[in-house]
Image (cartoon, rainbow, N blue to C red):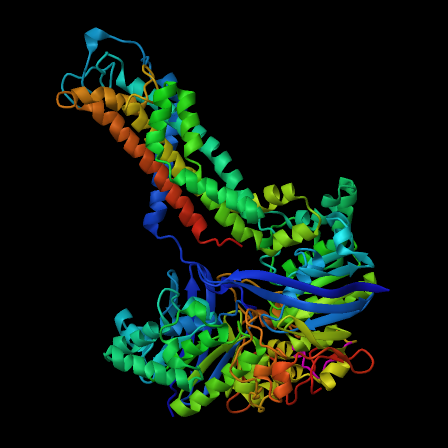
Amino acid sequence: MSTTAITPAAIPAAQTPRVGRAGFAIGLTIVGIVVAAALFGNALVPADPFVQDLGNRLKPPFWMDGAQAAHPLGTDQLGRDYLARLVYGARISLLIGIMTVITSGAIGITLGVVGGFFGGRVDDVVLFAITTRLSIPVVLVALAVVGLLGSGLILVVATLGLLLWDRFAVVARATTMQVRTLDYVNAAWCAGASTSHILMREILPNIASHLAVVATLEMALAILLEAALSFLGLGVPPPLPSWGLMIAEGKDYMFFSPWVIMIPGVALFVLVLGINLVGDGLRNLLGTERLR
Amino acid sequence: MSALLDVQDLSVTFGRTAAVRGASFRLEKGETHCLVGESGCGKSVTALAIMGLLARGGERRARRMVFAGTDLLSLSDRAMARLRGNRISMIFQEPMTSLNPAFTVGSQMAEVLTRHKRASRAAALERAVELMGRVGITAPQMRLGQFPHQLSGGLRQRVMIAMALMCDPELLVADEPTTALDVTVQAQILRLLARLKREFGLSILLITHDLGIVARVADRVSVMYAGEVVESAPTNGLFRAPQHPYTRGLLSCVPVPGKVQRDKPLGSIPGVVPTIAPGFSGCAFRSRCAYADATCERDIPRKAAGNTHDYLCRLVPRELAEPQPA
Amino acid sequence: MTAIEVKSLRREFAARSGLFGPQKRVVAVDDVSLSVPAGSVLGIVGESGCGKSTLARLILGLLAPTSGEALVDGQRLADIDRKARARLIQPVFQDPFASLNPRRRVSDIVALPLAAQGTFSRAEIERRVAAILERVGLSAEMGKRMPAQLSGGQRQRAAIARALVLEPRIVICDEPTSALDVSVQAQILNLLADLRRDLKLTYLFISHNLAVVEHVASEVAVMYLGRIVERNETEALFRAPRHPYTQALLASVLTPEPGRGVPDVGLGDTLPDPANIPPGCRFHPRCRIAVERCRVEPPQPMARGGAAMVECHLA
């Protein structure tokens, strides 16, 4: 029996160290820049990412000799402006990240909440589904699906969305099981609230913060996976400038024109780092708040 | 006569919040001293400040904080760690979270001795068995290999007490040690503490919100409110002639079985504990006090009501306990 | 008129010891029968593992009984739907931090029982919520706040407001003041007493704090390991407890009277374990006066005049 007359406020929770807070700020800044680039970039950058200029191939970026003012980040092997392609690629990465997370989140959260709330047989089914999904090698299946059905933006999103829901489901299920025993859920039940009300208005808002953290991490993963698929030629089809595709196309020129492969590589790294920092920061922010 | 623990003017702040604002008390050797108060009064934080266990962001300041001649304020972290578990032990409210669930009871208890006294593991385990027997744990040899979750709340608390005694400390700091236990188990644990106090020559700093425990167990009481010690007295004196309006209010709130009057409402203290902003002056209780007036917004004197009884209020001392006006 | 009637209520839980261990059945509530007259307060006392919280949940309909039935206001719980049940019986829980949804405003929380009925207009809901908030001593401004911005006592008042907004007949109070400071506890108990008088409510008041129960209840039932071992009018029970467990419970209460030391309650070292209920009288391993018969034969409930009932061979 634990009956206490002591509120936890007597000792404030440990505060996030300054380094952690800086990380969160940096992450937000990075993600903010990428989002801005995705939304407005191509309006600001004059060049067109698809126009080829075979006479102007493999021009170096501005920090090297031979750079051209019209192409600050140089050009690729088909003479397309690299900055424009990079900016457009940001849009693709973010789009894929967000749409995948929405899809996988919808599937995973629904399964997790339903399993965690109802328990019993329903939970057994959900657990079985999760276990099955966990035993599937994601990358191989994604490759197989895309290899069979052809590549394309929607297909990549659908495949990844249908494969990456497991962490959502696990976290949703665990947090739902914790929240379900709390007295405000019991009180809502006794008040006559319908099951859908309890799930949507009592449980979901209280686990949302934990799911947000999962969402950021899954988004980073989705972006990386898409890049990997595109690198293997089975993701977004050319000429769309997915960063993964840009890396793939650049690997032939790795030694003589290293920027072709470096620039999208660094961009990918920075974006994923930023998203992970945001996720970490969110978790620190919310980690001191217990599930009550 | 120098006290075992002498704390003068302790302040603990977390950022802008002052959890403790100038608490002072003395604990004599062989005494059970109770820090009593409700939630948010700062009693737990006081204990943690003495032990050097404040959470990150907590700053402590005191005019004086001396344990058996050693100045605790000037000790390095390492020196303080040598004291903890060795000469000053602490037990906490929730036995489940104070015992590491991943290690056996035996290894946790033995670790205390091997670290502080450099004893061999065998000797440490032997002492663990001996102590478990003395705190009333049955089949101690078997318990060595058990994990905390296999024991009930009362047993875990006994293990914690035994662990606290491994190095034969001089002072035991107990933070709400029985709050999470059933009332019958609570009586057993308190009797155990009294017996151990006699056998080991312990002094105990007991933190609680339960006035019943205070009355039955304490030699001396310090009542805390909003981060200050508002009254300090020997137990008999406090219950017979409480001086501070908060103490009197608190005593009138506690229903006593056998003396309960069902048709009359229980005494209560109206209002809630105020949040103390920086720059606060005067009495923290004035918003809830029936006797408050304008002078209570200025500095409050510490008055004496007898040799060893003092309180923080402008009112004059009263002889007998009168009922607090509703 | 009987507000609550419980007949041979029994609730078991399946528990597995270890990963491959045998399945054990834990009987949390074992053949409990009681009746609570309308307008009265029945106090239920007992320590951890006695089943009082499980009993509360059974009566509220949060758990289904393994066998037996509960009747509320003369109707079988199993027969009435949740919305009808909500109009009859409501809970006030122990932990004011956990009983209010931290993501909703207090006024929305209090309005939930009305909204869930589906038959009230928004204006009517607002009116009723405002009225009940005032009645429990919360200002309209506090209704606009989130639970984290209220103190423990204020949150408990909000929980009481939620329980009463549908004007139920019965309120199940499960340790409503155990998590509150002593000074606030008294405020809440006084409030509960006023409300009961004014709204003609029936309370089932569960607590481990005997002094509080003595103040609040007209009758008291003592539970141990799933059974009611003694029941009597409050004053009689506290004056002359018959069951050895009741006597031990009363003896272990520490009154704020200095100089009397801590009593030796004489219960021995074994602790009650609902998964391992002793044969015969379930209290016998801890009983100071147990005899051979107690180890073998479970005692039957015996009336002892008036409202008194005790389950002991030697009482």
- Is residue C54 on the magenta stretch? no
Question: Can I make out residue A138 in this image?
Answer: yes
Q: Position of residue B317 (x, y in %)?
A: 61, 86
Q: Going 68% across and 44% down the picture, which residue do you hit?
A: A194
What quarter of the picture does the N terminus of chain A occupy? Answer: bottom right
Question: Can I make out residue B234 in this image?
Answer: no
Classify residue C206 as left or right of residue A74: right
Specify the quadrant of the image occupied by residue B37: bottom right
A163 lies above or below C120: above
B180 lies above or below A244: below
Q: Position of residue B188 (x, y in %)?
A: 52, 83
Q: Nearer the viewer, residue A58 or C169?
A: C169
Classify residue A112 as left or right of residue C38: left
A187 lies above or below B135: above
A92 lies above or below A22: above
Q: Position of residue A87 (x, y in %)?
A: 33, 22
Q: Nearer the viewer, residue B105 or A236?
A: B105
- Is residue B255 on the magenta stretch? yes
Q: Going 69% across and 61% down the picture, which residue do you hit?
A: C67
Classified by dominant secondary structure, the portion drawn in magenta counts as loop
Q: Position of residue C54 (x, y in %)?
A: 64, 63
What quarter of the picture does the C terminus of chain A occupy? Answer: bottom right
Q: Which residues are magenta?
A: B252-262
Classify residue B145 as left or right of residue C191: left
Residue furthest right in the image: C1
